[in-house]
Structure formats: structure tokens, C-alpha cells
Amino acid sequence: MRVRVFLLIGAVLLSGCGVAISEGCPRIPTYAPDVQAHAANELEALPASSVLPDFIGDYAVMREELRAGGC
């Protein structure tokens, strides 16, 4: 009986180790040139202490990595 309980516990714990595999790539949004220009103007208007440019830079890197990966 104890062996069955341990096997059951082991099976439950190991079932959480599965990895989901996605077959598709996320959609990379496109922005119209006027929207990009507006965003650039807003970005330049931010105070020097703003952390938003760092976040936007990370977003740009992720977009490039997605493109490079065939997405």
C-alpha cells in the first residue's frame, strides 16, 4: 500500500515537469509611420529620470529576436 502511495505522489509531482510547446509565433504588431513618429516625440519628451526608455528598448530587442527566430 505504501509503495502505491509513493508512486502516486511521484507521478503527481513529475506531471508538473512537462513543458508546453507552442507551434506558432506571436504576432508582431506593425505601427504606421505617423504613430511611430508620435511615439518617438513622446519618448523624447520624457524626463531624464524616466525608466520607460529602458522598457521600450527591451521591447525592441524582443521584436528583433522574434524576427530573427523566423517569426
Image (cartoon, helix red, strand yellow):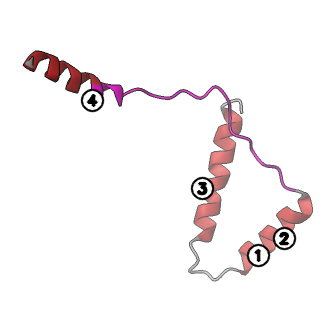
Q: Which residue is mark 3?
A: 58
Packing grade of label 4 (10 A; few <14, some 14-19, many >=20) is few
Residue 37 quadrant: bottom right
Between circles 1 and 4, the one closer to the viewer is: 4
Secondary structure state at the residue bearing disc 1: helix
**Quarter of the rendering containing residue 39:** bottom right
Of 21 and 53, the residue lying toward us:
21
Span colored in magenta: 12-31
Q: Is residue 33 left or right of residue 16?
A: right
From the image, which quarter does the C terminus lie in? top right
Answer above or below: position of 56 versus 29: below
**Amino acid of disc 4:** Leu
Crowding at label 2, few (<14), some or many (≥20) Cα neighbours within 10 Å?
Answer: few
Number of residues whose C-alpha sits closer than 10 Å to that of mark 3, classed few (under 14), some (14–19) or many (20 or more): few
Q: Please identify the dominant SS of the magenta region.
A: loop
Within the magenta stretch, is there residue 17? yes
Residue denoted by label 1:
42
Could you tell which of marks 3 and 4 lies nearer the N-terminus?
4
Q: Nearer the viewer, mark 4 or mark 2?
A: 4
Which numbered disc, 4 or 2, marks the residue that appears first in the sequence?
A: 4
Helix, strand or loop at label 4? It is helix
User: Which residue lies at the image location 65% right of the left edge and 61% below the top edge?
Assistant: 56
Q: Is there CB contact under 8 Å for labels 2 and 1?
A: yes
Check residue 38 in the rendering and tell me which mark sits there, or answer none.
2
Please state which amino acid type lies under the numbered disc 1.
Answer: Glu
